[in-house]
């Protein structure tokens, strides 16, 4: 199959590259492929009606697993802390649980949320808008572990290694990501080495028995099935850091790293749906609208709603601050629905002034999308 | 938009039919559409590596919700039993929990599993192969409730109504399905009115607070968010019984009802995956193969594995019977992998002699598919 090497697809010379395609964008009229569908069937988003819960119930929080959920047995798990430290550590779970525990309510979103709406569409996990969830994560602040290990004077980054193993664009790898030392050792918010989700041990798909939680950052930073932390004196250049998860326009741009979550608001779709089109149906009269809004850069300070497909916007009422600054914030308003077809939209603005676009800028990986949500609604009289 | 009525898409004359398309099959080269993707992003399958668990952990069991997950508050829920009974009942949850409880391990599969592999593809929830899961369901045998209510002499079916409300092919409806009285009142296996899943209350997406569990039947029979049971003296002709969930070749065939689960075996994909193609990678040498097999018609008695894309088949070892006759059965074998590309397959045969096809018969709804699984594998030397 490959004239350069003489290898054939079925023969003993077959190579990883033969089954591990390069990144690409879909053609102009190319529907979602079976490869994208296989990812969509494994991973899943938040059914939008579940925005009604302050904390997402188990099984409804979005999940994105790059390779396989590893077969991890909880109680014999070891976490190492090494590299540019004075005292390398090997920590078992009882030891980790003996540190002072912190519980944080954190909204997590996949960096590729919204990718499937881009034109042209980057071919990868094809999220529409639903790759989000909020959980209460319990664990040890990472800075306590770094203090215990003694950070070397020359350390600049912390590299986090997970047990999820696979191939991506020809590169065999364990999933690994880094954080700048200032983020990893920060106290407000703390980065957590988490062993609990919503008061229970982590489910297998969320990293059992240990994962990183990095409040305000997109999901790729929250390394699951965490087994090693390595401080380095040079920036990490592994696949997930310098190849994937970059904002770039062309394949050979160095690009900018994907980091914090752009602001977004979503609505609990009102009324009830059509099975296939997911168009919503409501009856004439007042329709309560509600949802959630979040940002990884600062608290959401404003949510606006449009009931005329973005031509005009009105202010929604924000729930009062409750101290969970790294979790989504509830908003509400009401709409006087009249017969016919409508498009509802919502957009958030955060304390830094960041807001959501009505036309989505494009990047080759399909990251950091936060286009305003459009919810088509049909208002019809009672049967 | 509709010349016959003068209604326009945006105007006050818009109708349910405008947003609720009829059933259809995809064109020959038609990729997966955004409507199908929206269903795939909401609903999700079992990541196949989770076949390793006897009982599927929460959040990994497949979920298919026709409309929305209703906002159900557990403790004030009421279940009515009425129609052709001598003593209509209204049962609250404490009363239901006061009946003798039964826990059954049951494998559930969506009737549309495999639909996205059909050619032409019926346009609906686009499952590949992963719409399955096994749970331990706890509840009251339905026959105890029917005994309490006193089944009328003329009753022939029990109709089950759930709180999931929506539109499908122009028909506004609560999700409703029926069972023949002999199945509903059976004792071996019992049909359960279940309030527990894996030792906890039902999660919202699995029917909180009550659902039906019908061992051996495809998922459409296990009505979630159950709130009424009505015995009838004529067969139920509601949408989900006589329009959807029929085996038919043409849109106007009356068709045959979809009932029990066809036999199927699935494999834990060996080795590790490529992110995008999901092709598996293994190293040369012995590779353990394992998985699960099930059937709604009788116990699985034979599992065969092929490592040469179906040209030859060898017997796998079945786990000894453990009494869970309505749950999947574990199988194992080993494969001596040599370098190159391979296709692994597995097929189950049950006690009634039903087995799995290597070419899938087609039906318009895409139901009851049980084509043998094909797992592409690349065997390469260690790096």
Image (cartoon, coloured by chain):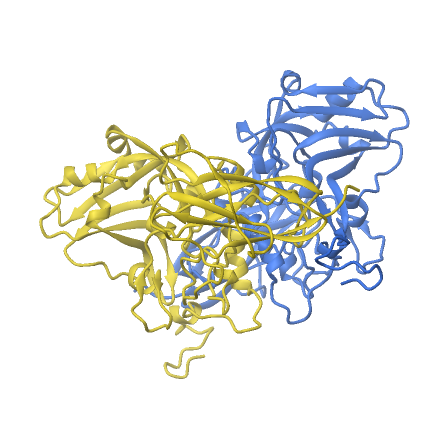
Chain colours: A yellow, B blue
Describe residue B309's horizontal placement relative to residue A184 as left or right.
right
Whether residue B321 is visible, yes or no, is: no
- Toward the viewer: A131 or A357? A357
As drawn, the residue found furthest toward the right would be B154
- Against A315, residue A4 (above or below) is below
| Residue at 25 percent of width and 35 percent of height | A92
Q: Horizontal and vertical percent for residue A94?
A: 27, 30
Quarter of image, res B93: top right
- Toward the viewer: A193 or A4? A193
Describe residue B120's horizontal placement relative to residue A101 as left or right.
right
| Residue at 55 percent of width and 63 percent of height | A34
Describe residue B258's horizontal placement relative to residue A280 as left or right.
right
Q: Horizontal and vertical percent for residue A276?
A: 67, 53
Q: Horizontal and vertical percent for residue B361?
A: 72, 60
- Which quadrant is home to the N terminus of chain B? bottom right
Quarter of image, res A249: bottom left
| Residue at 27 percent of width and 50 percent of height | A160
- Toward the viewer: B121 or A346? A346
- Which quadrant is home to the C terminus of chain B? bottom left
As drawn, the residue found furthest toward the bottom would be A3
Whether residue A300 is visible, yes or no, is: yes
Q: Horizontal and vertical percent for residue B299?
A: 65, 41
- Toward the viewer: B369 or A374? A374
């Amino acid at each position: 199959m490959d004239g350069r090497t003489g290898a054939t697809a079925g023969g003993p010379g077959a190579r990883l590259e033969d089954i591990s395609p390069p990144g690409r964008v879909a053609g102009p009229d190319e529907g979602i492929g079976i490869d994208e569908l296989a990812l969509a069937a494994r991973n899943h988003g938040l059914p939008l009606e579940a925005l009604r819960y302050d904390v997402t119930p188990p099984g409804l929080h979005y999940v994105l697993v790059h390779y396989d959920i590893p077969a991890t047995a909880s109680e014999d798990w070891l976490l190492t802390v090494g590299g540019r430290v004075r005292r390398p550590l090997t920590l078992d779970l009882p030891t980790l649980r003996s540190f002072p525990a912190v519980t944080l309510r954190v909204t997590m979103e996949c960096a590729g949320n919204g990718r499937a709406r881009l034109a042209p569409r980057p071919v990868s996990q094809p999220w529409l808008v639903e790759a989000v969830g909020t959980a209460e994560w319990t664990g040890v602040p990472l800075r306590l572990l770094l203090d215990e290990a003694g950070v070397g004077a020359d350390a600049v980054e912390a590299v986090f290694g997970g047990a999820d193993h696979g191939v991506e664009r020809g590169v065999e790898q364990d999933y690994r990501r880094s954080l700048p030392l200032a983020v990893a050792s920060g106290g407000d918010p703390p980065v957590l080495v988490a062993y609990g989700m919503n008061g229970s041990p982590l489910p297998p798909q969320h990293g059992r028995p240990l994962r990183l939680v990095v409040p305000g950052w997109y999901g790729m930073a929250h390394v699951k099935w965490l087994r090693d932390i390595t401080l380095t004196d040079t920036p990490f250049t592994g696949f997930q850091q310098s190849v994937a998860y970059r904002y770039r326009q062309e394949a050979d741009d160095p690009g900018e790293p994907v980091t914090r979550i752009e602001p977004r608001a979503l609505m609990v779709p009102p009324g009830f749906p059509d099975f296939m089109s997911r168009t919503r149906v409501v009856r004439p009269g007042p329709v309560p609208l509600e949802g959630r809004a979040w940002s990884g850069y600062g608290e959401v300070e404003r949510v606006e709603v449009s009931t005329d497909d973005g031509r005009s916007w009105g202010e929604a009422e924000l729930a009062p601050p409750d101290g969970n600054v790294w979790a989504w914030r509830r908003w509400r308003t009401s709409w006087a629905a009249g017969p016919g077809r409508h498009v509802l939209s919502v957009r958030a603005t955060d304390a830094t002034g960041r807001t959501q676009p009505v036309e989505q800028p494009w990047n080759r990986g399909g990251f950091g999308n936060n286009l305003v949500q459009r919810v088509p609604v049909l208002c019809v009289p009672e049967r």
